[in-house]
Image (cartoon, rainbow, N blue to C red):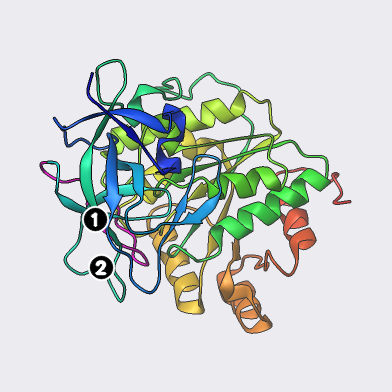
Amino acid sequence: MGLMVKVDKIASVVSRLALPDEIELTTTLESRSGNAVVVRVLPVGPSSQELELVDGRMIKMFGGDIVVGALGRRRALRGWPGDVPSDARVGDRLAILNRGGVIGVPAADTGRTSPLACEVIGMPLVDGRIPNLKDDTLPEAPTLAGLSLPPLGIVSGTCMQSGKTNFLSKLTQGLTKAGVRVAAGKLTGVACLRDLFAMRDNGAVRTASFQDSGYPSTAGLEHGELVAMARAVIVDLARSHPDVILLELGDGLIGDYGVVDVLTDDEIRAAIRVHAFCASDLAGAWAGDRYCRDAGLDVDLYSGPVTDNLVGVEYIEAHLDRPAVNAGKHPARLAEVVLGLLDMADRKVS
């Protein structure tokens, strides 16, 4: 038996692995995306970083904490980019790249701030092997053909923090109040459970994401692998017999997370009934419209900070010829617009 170690915090990225807080540790490491890894947090400066635990609680990390996360890649524009190390050894200095506990080699330039540094102390052993996120995943769904699927409502955006999760949460709440059974999920991004919890808190009867298919993030995934994952999530959500499936595409339309790969897949596109686009400003809304048109994609409505006042709303509705609704200010109006697009205008928001 290897060394037994009591860990202080288990990150949400490994939630499906159900690891105990006392684990057997190996110092013979394998650097592979999704492998669980045990690190010691290095001394923290004036501002400490938060970590999301497996139960969704968000807590601070402190120097000396023993944390279990998973190796992964991140390519966020407003966040800390990093990669799976080419090799991993005890004593290597890595970084905790996001709140979900994705761990990797930080990029040379991480922006105005730096991710929380950590030191590798080993990897867990379960039944004699290193656990990987792929050990417990949703069943494969190689095709959607022949399946009876509800309509899909998808939200994409210009970038992270463009209002997509707020949009989906408010829409889930509004549709639920109208008696619509909603399942919701996330198809691209980096592992973190808080978006799924927000969907559940607002009425979703079932949630799932790329994380449930064994990925710490979708950054850099090959097209076929990404589309197969997205189909598996959609099929899993359909098992709850919802009236509609709402899906968030994390990060931006342009980027490394595969948003366009999902939107342009023939089988997924055939099931989409509503495509919403969130933007921070008018240039972003205009560019999103142009980019989607060039890719043969429709945008049905706009939201996000660009709709915070009438200037954005009026421009979009006049020049892009689509409704623009602020999800935070007008959630009932948002639900009514989407119900119309779903041919469910007979449902009324209570």
Label 1 crowd (10 A; few <14 / some 14-19 / many >=20): many
Label 2 crowd (10 A; few <14 / some 14-19 / many >=20): some
Relative vertical location of residue 29 with respect to residue 323 in this rendering, above or below: above
Q: Which residue is mark 2?
A: 110
Rendered residue at 41%/29% (across/down) = 19
Query: Over which residues does the magenta segment extend?
Result: 74-88
Given residues 3 and 10, the one toward you in this image is 3
The kind of residue on which mark 1 rests is Gly
Rendered residue at 30%/15% (across/down) = 127
Quadrant hosting residue 49: bottom left
Quadrant hosting residue 240: top right
- Disc 2 versus disc 1: distance between alpha carbons? 8 Å
Q: Which residue is mark 1?
A: 82
76 in magenta? yes
The secondary structure type at the circle numbered 2 is loop
The kind of residue on which mark 2 rests is Thr
Can residue 34 be seen here?
yes
The secondary structure type at the circle numbered 1 is strand
Residue 242, image x, y percentages: 69, 31
Q: How many marks?
A: 2
Given residues 272 and 253, the one toward you in this image is 253
Residue 219, image x, y percentages: 30, 48
Principal SS element in the magenta part?
loop
- Check whether the beta carbons of the residues at disc 2 and disc 1 lie within 8 A of each other: yes
Residue 177, image x, y percentages: 82, 47
Indicate which disc, 2 or 1, sits on the residue closer to the N terminus.
1
Relative vertical location of residue 86 with respect to residue 332 in this rendering, above or below: above
Relative vertical location of residue 44 with respect to residue 6 in this rendering, above or below: below
Given residues 261 and 82, the one toward you in this image is 82
